[in-house]
Amino acid sequence: GENVEQHPSTLSVQEGDSAVIKCTYSDSASNYFPWYKQELGKRPQLIIDIRSNVGEKKDQRIAVTLNKTAKHFSLHITETQPEDSAVYFCAASPYNQGGKLIFGQGTELSVKP
Amino acid sequence: GAVVSQHPSRVICKSGTSVKIECRSLDFQATTMFWYRQFPKQSLMLMATSNEGSKATYEQGVEKDKFLINHASLTLSTLTVTSAHPEDSSFYICSADNREGLGYTFGSGTRLTVV
């Protein structure tokens, strides 16, 4: 089945710097890759997603890139702010498996003012 | 739009008792819902896929007789943790495909503590 690996597990940056989180997946048939932000004790919130027919997507300070050949996708956050501090999860949705999501291990991002 | 309500948000139960968690899609119909479990500082692990009107599909290693799932309507799925033990203490969270091209919407989660 699908397996998603996420790195790094923790990331500390200075306010205003960029942050990059990387994920790899194993199932080449996966076709949907969302990123979630989860604050302590809260539900995951979708921040951006990308489908397999697109290589890059951007939404203000957040961008996601997808390399299907290498089976990896990355989250890029520019001009980081303290409120970006949270745990970020990537996920992959295997094709034809009912839409379930397989999550990466998570990255705890800390943005220092 | 695309709101998923989950209840209760917190529950404490005695070892050996059962606990029911409800997941409702408030403004859309969800033929499929998903149940995840999240231990502290860990990722979300898919437990099962809940299908309206049919049996749930459980992930490998998840005991279907312990985690009973019922999806009786297009807006409600329930997860019952039977004969709960302290090791079942976790954050349980559901999600549904909101079909608005916005991915999957998560419920607010249920913090289960078994004492």
Image (cartoon, coloured by chain):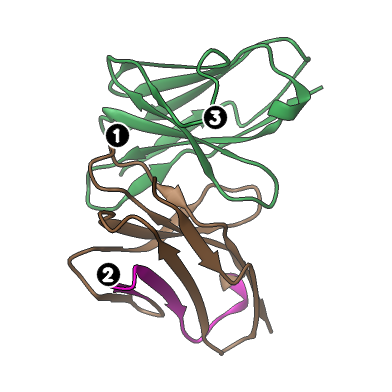
Name the amino acid, label 2: Lys
Looking at the picture, does residue A18 appear above or below residue A82?
below
Magenta-drawn segment: A64-83
**What color does chain A have in the rendering?**
brown
Quadrant of residue B52 in the image? top left
**What chain does mark 1 sit on?**
B
Name the amino acid, label 1: Asp
Question: Residue beneath label 2, please?
Answer: A68
Is there a contact, CB below 8 Å, between mark 2 and mark 1?
A: no
Name the secondary structure under disc 3: loop
Label total for image: 3
The dot on residue B61 is 3
**What color does chain B have in the rendering?**
green
| Residue at the image position 36 percent from the left and 41 percent from the top | A100
Name the secondary structure under disc 1: loop
| Residue at the image position 29 percent from the left and 34 percent from the top | B27
**What chain does mark 2 sit on?**
A
The dot on residue B27 is 1
Extreme residue in the right direction: B115
| Residue at the image position 52 percent from the left and 65 percent from the top | A6
Name the amino acid, label 3: Gly
Q: Position of residue A56 (x, y in %)?
A: 27, 76
